[in-house]
Amino acid sequence: MAWIVKNSAEMTIERREEPYLDDQMKKELEAEVLPRFPTRQAATLPVLHAIQEKHNWLPYQALEETADFLGLKPSDVLDTATFYEEFFLQPKGRYLIQVCQSISCELRNHDALLEGISRKLGIQPGQTTTDGKFTLMTVECLGSCGTAPCALVQGRLHEDVRFEDFEKALDSLPHEDGRPDTPASERA
Amino acid sequence: MALQEPVLTQRIPTPPFGDPADRKLIRHEQYVASGGYAALRKAMEHEPKEIIETVKISELRGRGGAGFPAGLKWSFLPPQDGEPRYLAINADESEPGTFKDRLLIDFDPHLLLEGIAICMHACQLDTAYIYIRGEYHHQAKVLEQAIAEAYDNKIFGPGTIMGKVNDRDPRCFVHRGAGAYICGEETGLLESLEGKRGWPRIKPPFPAVAGAFGRPTIINNVETLAAVVPIIMRGPDWFKSMGVKRPEGAPPTAPASYGPKLYGVSGHVNRPGVYEEELGIRLGDLIENYCGGMLNGKKFKAAVPGGISMGVLGTDQYDAVLDFEVGRKYACLGLGTAGVIVMDEDTDMVAMARNIARFFSHESCGQCTPCREGSGWIYKTLCRIEQGDGTTRDLDMLLELAGSMGAMPGTTICGLADGTNWAVRTILNKFWDEFESRVAKSSSVALPVLTH
Ligand SMILES: Cc1cc2nc3c(=O)[nH]c(=O)nc-3n(C[C@H](O)[C@H](O)[C@H](O)COP(=O)(O)O)c2cc1C
Ligand code: SF4
Ligand code: FES
């Protein structure tokens, strides 16, 4: 629901010294991505994807840095970023589980899958486990309706999922995956 | 009538011609070895105008949902004026029930790239953006790799077999969306490409005149562009030997349904999947001959013909012919993406309607009041009916609400609201008794509404 506006009047922006969009990334984006478009604004989605890929979410400071880099107002970047469901303006778990809830998956019993995951992790869709390992979300059609029910785990598609198999896949995920840790204080 | 040989799935083993277990990604080398990029070379021997004419004669209609004739769209472009011109490939594929473009990208990405290159030549478009939905992580990587191969092999970039296109080196990029169904709507897509919220634009101007970055832009679906390749290779007559002809006596402007089509079948069938057939296969044949019949031998109850925006076919429409006329003949919106969702006798249609309404309510971009508010209202009402608290008045209200929203009644900017409209109305109308018996059993007492 991209049109729900969040109250930002009392919000304070947490800042850190080190930039999220660092010089190396800027250099690469400048060389690889910006020449693709006649405007700098068009690189907004690719830049946000790149930051989120590296930091796992998009802190407000990162949005400001993006605006600065692309010659935009921070509000332009916020406007865009809040529209898209895949951009996380709050920290999420190390592994994002997105379970499809659209019609073909409902017809093929996605309930059992979702319930199973929810019970196993002790969280509802939209929540993150206390150890910061998993965030569970329900999403609309993943374009895999022929192999319903299905779910994405950190971008990897699992098709024709039975909960027992899925559970094993989740158990086999290492807690450390090489990404910089999200400080406990920043977790949702 | 049955497809004689695989066309779009030539290199993607698909029953009855091949076994899906044998599918593998076709790299550039294998693509060329099996006749790939010959159509592009052939196209380069012809003037751009001639290619547009060929596509026009083939009467290829868009495979992305609206069924607009591709050649006609291409001919709307204004003359070149020295400035850039764009091609946006719609790989957003987010309509529930639709997973056909993914098959092409997963296994035969160069077929799409060849179609793109031919379109760029025909329309003199110098830059192509493949707008792919964010959730297609793997597919974006496959395309990146295929594009890199295409640059290495002089399909795109400087000094290619296309030479200069619109006086520039032809370029092609992948552009990833970030989870918003509305970015599949062509002008929402353009806004998103420009780095903004995917808010559909008011038309006119149409994208062919003022599209991406205010410049002439063609937007086509993945499957549409893939279909251009065999048309160039084998000619429009061959293409028109497949599909459903114009009815006897109809004027030449009446749309026909020619060529092969990818049908993605999901839901209660034994072998769901993407199958290629001539346009105009009977729904029952698709289920029985391709999908191994209904799951667990249950009876057929309903089917969505082509993505949930199109509404449903009722229990007595098992014999519906799935071509571009399906809407007119069987009281639904149309063929859409040909993403067929099959439902068996045990399916709760109230629950289905609720699921679909939630999708549209969730994906509404919020610009138009009837769509934003109407879809939420419909969703909540359906939840209430499902829980057993509905009233007969709710049913009338649902019909009235749904009927009032959409670009066709003229109350909204884009077609998303028409999808809500048709989905809700057709389910309600075709399964009225089921809804009525649900509200009849309802425990709630209708209270007069004092304020709202
Ligand atoms: C709400 C909405 C969503 C759409 N989503 C898609 C999509 O995901 N993929 C697609 O190809 N077309 C989609 N379309 C249709 C496009 O607007 C457009 O008609 C199509 O991409 C044109 O290509 P074609 O003529 O080759 O079919 C959508 C339309 C609407 C109204
Ligand atoms: S009809 Fe709905 S989705 Fe389309 S522009 Fe209006 S509010 Fe947005
Ligand atoms: S409905 Fe779940 S993947 Fe399409």
Image (cartoon, coloured by chain):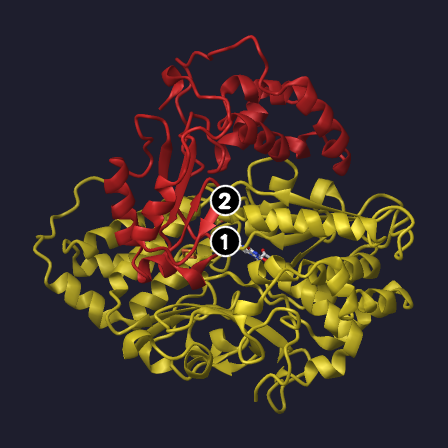
Badge 1, how many Cα within 10 Å: few under 14, some, many 20+? Answer: many
Amino acid identity at mark 2: Ala
> Quadrant location of the C terminus of chain A?
top left
Q: Nearer the viewer, residue B156 or B197?
A: B156
- Pointer 1: what residue? B94
What kind of element bears circle 2? Answer: loop
As drawn, the residue found furthest toward the bottom would be B248
Find out whether the residues at labels 1 and 2 contact each other: C-beta distance under 8 Å.
Answer: yes
Q: Tell me the colour chain A is drawn in.
A: red
Residue A54: x and y, percent? Answer: 56, 27
Badge 2, how many Cα within 10 Å: few under 14, some, many 20+? Answer: many
Chain under disc 2? B
N-terminal label among 1 and 2: 1
Taking the image as shown, residue B271 lies to the left or right of residue B116, namely left
Mark identifier at residue B110: none
Residue B290: x and y, percent? Answer: 47, 79
The residue that appears at 74% across and 27% down in the rendered structure is A30
Asked if one can make out residue B216 in the rendered structure from this viewpoint, the answer is no
